[in-house]
Amino acid sequence: MPRASALGTSGASDSLATGTAATLEAFADTLIPGQRRFPGDYAIAGAVQGPGAVQAGVIDVLTSPLLPARPALNLIASLLNARAIAYAALHLLPLPVTLPAMVGLSFRHRTNLVVGLFEEEDLDRKIWQVMSLLVSVAFDTAGHLDTATAVAGSHAGLTWLGFPQPDPDGKWRFSDFSYGIALADLHPNTDSSGGPA
């Protein structure tokens, strides 16, 4: 499947504190990793080839005016970096002073840290659950864009997942069943729009 280039961010991170965007990108890249955008791209660990959550616009999703997350992002990034510092101290890992702590961890250590954030006894678990959902929204659905715009712009996640192009009139019709077979007969009272009559 072809790999798509990322849609550029639209300055969504401008109001974030220094290091916040990179910290949130490192978190997102741990959940849905991608390849580095440029040499010296420390937020993305470069653990895989192809696009990940960052290329799919995770910062645009997190900072969307349609979501209430933006005012809390600096605090969430600070909390994440505090957890990264604690993790590094516990494992005797040196952290670079020029990067946010989360960004300074290797992919293996980022992964270990993030796994721990989702443990049942973690007091901040609900924060990380919501954040992980938003990371998925960026990659799996291009949640910050309407679908037609995302597909026309070769959105990284939708392209990677093989999301189909619309019909020539711009509408999506799925003539093939998603499992390749009909799972049930059409109810006799179904109207022409597919709804119950």
Image (cartoon, rainbow, N blue to C red):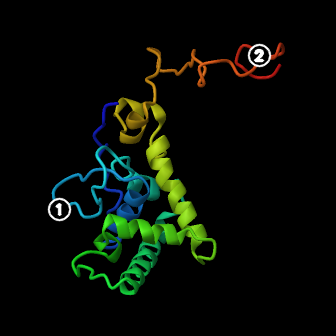
Image location of residue 43, percent across then percent down = 29, 63
Image location of residue 89, percent across then percent down = 37, 86
Q: Is residue 29 left or right of residue 134?
A: left
Mark 1 Cα-neighbour bin, 10 Å: few <14, some 14–19, many ≥20 = few
Mark 2 Cα-neighbour bin, 10 Å: few <14, some 14–19, many ≥20 = few
Name the amino acid, label 2. Asp
Viewer-side residue, 115 vs 11: 115
* Residue topped by disc 2: 185
Mark 2 and mark 1 lie on one chain; the one further toward the N terminus is 1
Q: Quadrant of residue 83?
A: bottom left
Image location of residue 27, percent across then percent down = 41, 64
* Residue topped by disc 1: 40
- Look at the image and tell me whether residue 193 can be seen: yes
Tell me the quadrant of the picture where the N terminus can be found.
top left
- Look at the image and tell me whether residue 15 can be seen: no
Could you tell me which secondary element the residue under label 1 belongs to?
Answer: loop
Could you tell me which secondary element the residue under label 2 belongs to?
Answer: loop
Tell me the quadrant of the picture where the C terminus can be found.
top right
Q: Quadrant of residue 102?
A: bottom left
Image: 161 above or below 116? above
Q: Looking at the rendered structure, which numbered label has been put on residue 130? A: none
Q: Residue at x 53, y 66 (%)?
A: 128
**Tags 2 and 1 touching, CB below 8 Å:** no
Image location of residue 99, percent across then percent down = 25, 75
Viewer-side residue, 81 vs 143: 81
Name the amino acid, label 1. Gly
